[in-house]
Image (cartoon, helix red, strand yellow):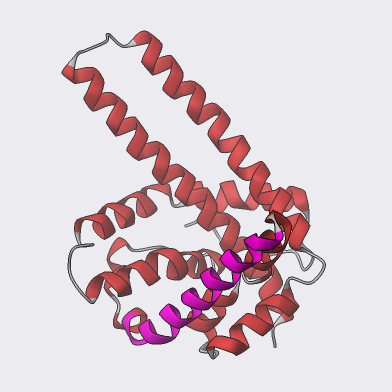
Amino acid sequence: MQPVESVPDVLEFGDLLGYAFRWGFGQYFNILLMLLLWVLTIWIPYVNIGTTIAVTTGAPILLSRQQRISPTFIFNREYRTVMADWLLLLGLMVGAVLFALVFVLVPALVLSFGWLLAPLLLVDRGMGVLESLRRSWQATLGEKWTLFFGLLAVYFLYLLPAGLILWLLWIVLPKGESTTTVIMRLYTLLAYAGLAAVDMGFTGYVYAVLGKRVS
C-alpha cells in the first residue's frame, strides 16, 4: 500500500469524494477477491455471519487505518465473537429506520447516517450495542447532511461512467451471443465490486475522521 496519509480533522465534502475513490480503488483487487470469497462461502452456517460482519464492517475499519485488506481476513474468529451484539445492533438499527419511514423519508435518512459508525465502534472498539449507537450519533452531529450528499455524489460519480460503459457494451457487442452474455456478466461483477470498494472507502474515511470525536 501507499504510505499512510494524514487524515483531516474536519469532514469536508470534497475530501469525502477524494478519499472514497482513492482508498476504495487503492485496494480494488483485494476487495474484489474478498467479495468473491465471501460469496463462495456464504452457504456455510455460522461462518457466513462472521464473514458478513468482516465484509460490511471489518473492511471499512481496515481502510480507515489504511491497512492492507487480505481477502482471507473475513474468516478471522474475532468477527464471529461479536455475532450476537452485531445482530442485535443491526436489528435495532433496521427496526428504527423502518419505523422512521412512517414519518416520511427524512427521519429515516437522519437515523441511517447518525448511526453509520455504530457497527464499526461495536466491532473495532468493543462498545456495547446502545453505547455504540449513542457515540455514533454524537460523532455525526452536524455532519449528517454532509454525509448524505457526499455519499450521493460518490454513487453518482461512480455509477454515471459505469452505466455508460455498460450501455456502450450493450450497443457494440453482438446480440444473442454467449460471449456477449459472459462479457456483460463479468463487467457487472467487476462494476459491482468497484461500487462496493468506493462505498467502503467512504465509510472508512468517515470513520477515520469522525472516529476522532469518540474518546
In the picture, measured across the screen, residue 171 lies left or right of residue 108, that is left
Task: Answer above or below: position of 211 versus 59.
Answer: below
Q: Judge by depth and name the residue closer to the eye, 104 or 4.
A: 104
**Could you tell me which residue is drawn at 56 percent across and 37 percent down?**
158
Residues in magenta, as a range: 80-103
The quadrant holding residue 127 is bottom right
**Could you tell me which residue is drawn at 57 percent across and 63 percent down?**
204
Q: In which quadrant will I find the C terminus?
A: bottom right
User: Seen from this angle, which residue lies furthest right?
Assistant: 142
**Could you tell me which residue is drawn at 22 percent across and 26 percent down?**
182
Q: Can residue 48 be found in the magenta stretch?
A: no
Query: Can you give x and y, in whole percent of width and height, for residue 80 in the image?
Result: 32, 81
Task: Answer above or below: position of 160 versus 136.
Answer: above
The quadrant holding residue 148 is bottom right
**Could you tell me which residue is drawn at 36 percent across and 38 percent down?**
190
- Would you say the magenta stretch is mainly helix, strand or loop? helix
In the picture, measured across the screen, residue 205 lies left or right of residue 137, that is left
Q: Judge by depth and name the residue closer to the eye, 60 or 184.
A: 184
Task: Answer above or below: position of 77 versus 13.
Answer: below
In the picture, measured across the screen, residue 129 lies left or right of residue 171, that is right
Q: Can residue 99 be found in the magenta stretch?
A: yes
